[in-house]
Image: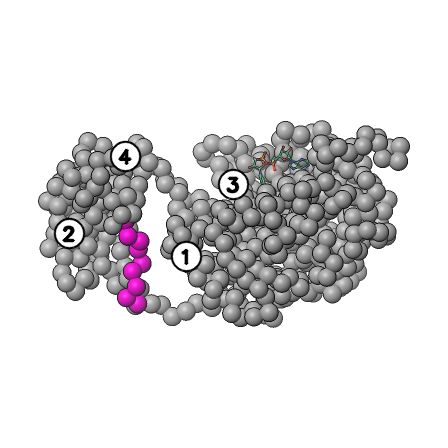
Amino acid sequence: MKNDTPNPLLAAAAPAGDRAADTLVPITVAHGDGIGPEIMEATLKVLMAAGARIAPETIEIGEKLYHAGHSSGIAPESWDSLRRTKVFLKSPITTPSGGGYKSLNVTIRKTLGLYANVRPCVSYSPFVATKHPKLDLVIVRENEEDLYAGIEHRQTDEVFQCLKLITRPGCEKIVRYAFEYARANGRRKVTCMSKDNIMKMTDGLFHQVFDEIRVDYPEIATDHMIIDIGAARLATRPEQFDVIVTPNLYGDIISDIAAEMTGSVGLAGSANIGEHVAMFEAIHGSAPDIAGKGIANPSGLLLGAVMMLVHIRQPEVAAKIHNAWLCTLEDGVFTADLQSQGKPQTQRGIPMPFGSMDFADAIIERLGRLPAQFKPVSYQNAPLPKTPAAAKPLYVRAPAAKKALVGVDVFVHQSALSADDLAVQLKASNTAALQLQMITNRGVKVWPGGFPETFCTDHWRCRFVAATPAGEIAQRDIVALLGTLTEAGVDVIKTENLCTFDGVKGFALGQGQ
Ligand code: NAD
């Protein structure tokens, strides 16, 4: 473990309110699905034994609710509890596969504005076997946007679409949060990972905002990596990383990788931080393959709960639990997920591995002890969560740009014609204001000057641009074009307006254009 920085398990923003030291803090608790109830029972047992001053309110979420007809996985009255307590300790839930069900995790994060998913991953070598004993990093994952917007459509017989939404407020909030977190926790470097060599506008914005904001934190080193090489480096040289900030999907993937590299995905907790509410959980899922066996590792949820205790201003209880947990690892106590690492069958005569509740009892036995080999954890100087009034706004809306409408992409479903024949048909629908400029298929230009080798689906993006040199059109010109296309029997799926913002194109070229 890093010896010269405070422990990473801190939530740096979001209010918990000022609460007197001896009052019980109401928190909302959900026991979840699969291994959820087992690890929650173990976690709450440790919290109570350690003297956590909490008053849990239990809500039901997940499979039961889905099957009771709540397609969101949560009953309306449960939102009341979450909005009242503003603190949520949540076990993993199972999202039923197939259509008709939305992921409740994503719904909760987005509905409550939990924009920052903070996922510390730390190796506990030599007590937990790992190929990466120096791994000690924090992944700050954007939590509300990207492909997780969940806006998906089937557009043609052959083509399905998922919208990737990246916004300036989203980027600014998460990037600023990552730097604030690094500063508050003595972290020295923030690495941005994106795929802006391909997604120049969406991931490009993320990278651009990172470059804009990093200048406000001159004491913190920065770098940017394309996510593919970044993930590869993370898997081979994790000690090069400190804080990583990245969009939602990449963050989801690399945090599972990083947690697994520490020895088990069952070891990592996470905080989902918003301006009003915060949610704490393990990073892993409901592990249906081991559910009901009592063998799950409760550590991820417990470390999530430790982050929660810091957030609700009970740093001494958080440290007591964290130190007892470290002592448990030092004493060689382990759960089944860590067994495949050449561990002994017994430890001081006690059969191993421990089940979830026995592991919790082992932690409870060690409450009050400090680890001998790991650096003892203290949260006394942990930065307290700021109240909304005290916190610097993470996003301030800029004045609107001058926007000009210069064309339209018309998406068309058709399987009978070649690109050249489709172009002939579409050009017949040109209006005085708009004329066909280009056709792409899956983003590659196929007209004019397409290649016969290019495979084409039944989904065509047909770009119409302003016919006049001034280049600007009106919405009614698009309506008129759609009228002529419809009369010509063209199956229009959707349109995207082509705009400039302060004279800068707000749309990408076709591949090969
Ligand atoms: P998973 O994380 O549940 O399990 C992956 C593997 O890790 C399994 O082999 C499992 O046994 C093991 N594992 C996970 N946690 C463990 C623990 N605490 N102790 C020991 N072993 C552990 O991932 P999955 O199987 O892909 O997903 C199962 C379900 O969980 C899916 O329905 C998925 O949607 C859901 N899920 C929920 C959350 C959440 O609620 N936050 C997160 C991820 C996945």
Mark 1 beta carbon near ligand 1 (under 8 Å)? no
What amino acid is found at the position of numbered circle 4 in the picture?
Phe
Which residue does the image show at 61% across and 50% down from the upper left?
238
Residue extent of the magenta highlight: 502-510
Tell me, yes or no, whether the two marked residues, 3 and 4, touch with CB atoms within 8 Å.
Answer: no
Mark 3 beta carbon near ligand 1 (under 8 Å)? yes
Above or below, 433 against 102 in this view is below
Tell me, yes or no, whether the two marked residues, 3 and 2, touch with CB atoms within 8 Å.
Answer: no
User: How packed is label 2: few (under 14 Cα within 10 Å), some, or many (20 or more)?
Assistant: many
For the stretch drawn in magenta, what is the main secondary structure? loop
Report x, y in % for residue 319: 77, 55
Which residue does the image show at 38% across and 54% down from the upper left?
200
Dot 3 or dot 4: first in sequence order is: 3
Is 128 placed left or right of 404 in the picture?
Answer: right
| Residue denoted by label 4 | 455
Is 332 placed left or right of 14 in the picture?
Answer: right
Q: Nearer the viewer, residue 495 or 136?
A: 136
| Residue denoted by label 3 | 103
Circle 1 SS class:
helix
Report x, y in % for residue 393: 53, 68
- Marks 3/4: CA–CA distance: 34 Å
Q: Nearer the viewer, residue 118 or 130?
A: 130
Dot 4 or dot 1: first in sequence order is: 1
Mark 2 beta carbon near ligand 1 (under 8 Å)? no
> Which quadrant would residue 383 be assigned to in this image?
bottom right
